[in-house]
Amino acid sequence: MTITPLEQRLLDLCAVPSATGEEGPLCDRVEAELRSLPGSIAVERDGHSLVVTPRAAGEGPSVVLAGHFDVVRTEHDGPPRVDGERLYGPGASDMKSGLAVMLTLLDEIALGALPRVRPTFVFYEREEGPYLENRLGDLLDRFAALRSADLAVCLEPSSNGLQLGCMGSLHARVHFRGRTAHSARPWQGENAIHRSAGFLGRLAAWAPREVLLDGMPYREVVSATLAEGGRGRNVVPDRFTLNVNFRFAPGRTPADAEAELIELVAGDAEVEVFDRSPSAPPCKDHPEVSALLACGVEGVESKQAWTDVARFASVGVPAVNLGPGTQSQAHQRNEWTDRAALARGMTLFRRWVFGAGA
């Protein structure tokens, strides 16, 4: 079996553990590799993140290619490996396949390939954790050049499909209060779990709501995702808490979603919003999005989930999602990515960065 240099690079990346908060060793390895490249490439480190700028570039627009070092903790039956048409390993899909493409592009620039655009490459930490711990926001604050880019591409796994915009996300704890009693005499207390019935009924009846923006459909949804409460098997509970996740469409703010959730709770409980992630609009008519379309993207759709395109959008930088990783494998046990799709993604990004004839 022949393993291509791109595949070997991905295997090497997957072999370095980099769960969220533990990205240091992978950042060290990538930094050393980049600093050893010939040519003039500026490498700036911030924590366990890197901002990399080749000196040689064309006169085209300023673009950012962004990928995160960290992966979620998943189970694997063996080491990173190639088996048939699949390459297995932690982060093989999300999103070390994107990192492998980014590093290969930097190799080719260092060896003399001249980009038609002016690219900056961002490798960052803590994307898979809470919104406020994600280090991309810090990099956008520190590096002014990132905030002045004409377009950013987040190489999240999309199976080489172009995904426009992203949903916003709000997490809230909904606290129901009651009064304890012995479960043999429940009339002496007030059951906090039972108090949630009205809200849960309204939540179950809340149908997904489609919102069209620039012709792209986004589906707003609200879900209870965690529940916690009770003091014992024979105690009427005086507390019950639900985690509620509201995914809202581009064009709406976290404040809009919070107001709607409070209305849905209708005074039955206390609402504690603790995680707010903004949405991002589609950039369907952007010239560089059109250039990407001409390079062989495999379909165009709206992004139903949240991604860091919203961080770029929040500082005025249009951004899209496009990556070679197999989307359905993100965060999966025995995560893998399709080898042929990885190769096609490499070709797509070469065409975009260096020109259609690359």
Image (cartoon, rainbow, N blue to C red):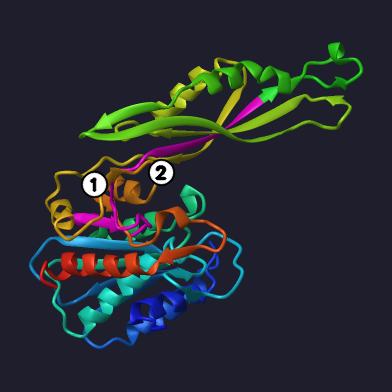
Of circles 2 and 1, the one toward us is: 2
Residue 215 position (above or below residue 287): above
Q: Nearer the viewer, residue 352 or 3?
A: 3
Q: Quadrant of the C terminus?
A: bottom left
Q: Residue at x 17, y 54 (%)?
A: 293
Q: Residue at x 34, y 82 (%)?
A: 5
Residue 226 position (above or below residue 134): above
> Which quarter of the picture shows residue 292?
bottom left
Q: Nearer the viewer, residue 248 or 10?
A: 10
Residue 190 position (above or below residue 33): above
Q: Which mark is residue 305?
A: 2
Q: Secondary structure at mark 1?
A: loop
Q: Amino acid at mark 2?
A: Ala
Residue 55 left/right relative to 3 = left
Q: x, y percentage for residue 179?
A: 79, 19
**In the image, residue 168 lies in the stretch drawn in magenta:** yes
Magenta stretch, residue numbers = 147-175
Q: Secondary structure at mark 2?
A: loop
Residue 118 visible at all: no
Q: x, y percentage for residue 278?
A: 37, 40
Q: Amino acid at mark 1?
A: Gly
Q: x, y percentage for residue 126?
A: 48, 59
Q: Residue at x 35, y 65 (%)?
A: 98
> Mark 2, residues whose alpha carbon is within 10 Å: few (<14), some, or many (≥20)?
some
Residue 158 left/right relative to 116 = right
Whole-number angstrom distance, CA of label 2 to CA of label 1:
20 Å
Residue 223 position (above or below residue 42): above
Mark 2 or mark 1: which comes first in sequence? 2
Q: Residue at x 14, y 52 (%)?
A: 290
Residue 23 left/right relative to 116 = right
Q: Which mark is residue 139?
A: none
Dot 1 corresponds to which residue?
Answer: 316
